Image (cartoon, rainbow, N blue to C red):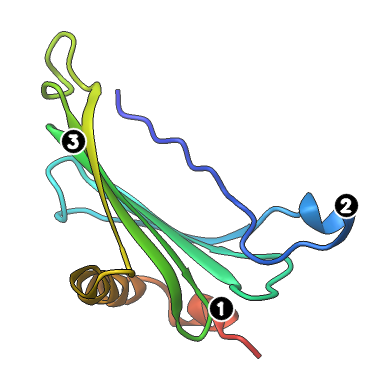
Amino acid sequence: MKSAIYCCLALGAASGAQSALAKPVLLQTVELEDMSTDGGEAKLYRATTPALAPCRMDVIHYGESGRAGYVFIFGSRLQSATRTEYRYNLPYYMTGGGKVASTHSITLKSAAGRKQLEADFAEYKAKFDPRKLAQCETR
C-alpha cells in the first residue's frame, strides 16, 4: 500500500502565537494520472496569513522503483522550488522493497535546476482551476 505524508508548513511569516498556529487552506487536489507508473497527485494550498508567499503546491509521483516530490512556493511569481527524488532498494511490491535507498534534490539555486523547475511549475500549475490560482496572486 502506498502512502504519503503531507506536511503543511507555514507559508508566510508568522507573527504572534495565533498566527503561528494558523494552518494553510487546501484549495484543490488534482490526480496526476498517466504522468508516472503508479499515479500521483498535486495539492494547492493557500496560507491563512500570506505575508510573503501566499501559496504552496505539493506534488508527488509514485513509481515502482521510487517516488518524486516537488514543493513550489509562490505568489504572483515562483519564489522557491525543490524536487526530491527517492529511489527504493527494490520495487515496493517485492518482499523487503519500498525502502528509500537514496535521494537526490534539485533547487532553483543552479541554472539547470531553475530551468527545469520553472518548466515543471508551469506544467503543474496548468492543471489547477484558474479561479483557485487567482487566490495566490499577491495584492
Disc 1 residue type (three-letter): Cys
Residue behind mark 3: 66
- Residue 136, image x and y in percent? 56, 78
Between discs 2 and 3, the one toward the N terminus: 2
Q: Between label 1 and label 3, give the one nearer the viewer.
A: 3
Residue at image x 33%, y 69%? 109
Between discs 2 and 1, the one toward the N terminus: 2
The answer for how far apart the CA atoms under marks 2 and 3 are is 39 Å
Q: Give the number of callouts.
A: 3
Asked if residue 82 lies left or right of residue 5, the reply is: left
Residue behind mark 1: 136
Q: Is residue 93 above or below residue 115?
A: above
Q: Is residue 134 above or below residue 15?
A: below
Secondary structure of residue under mark 3: strand
Q: Between label 2 and label 3, give the one nearer the viewer.
A: 2
Residue at image x 12%, y 32%? 65
Residue behind mark 2: 17
Asked if residue 17 lies left or right of residue 69, the reply is: right
Q: Is any atom of residue 63 visible in this view?
A: no
Disc 3 residue type (three-letter): Gly
Between discs 1 and 3, the one toward the N terminus: 3
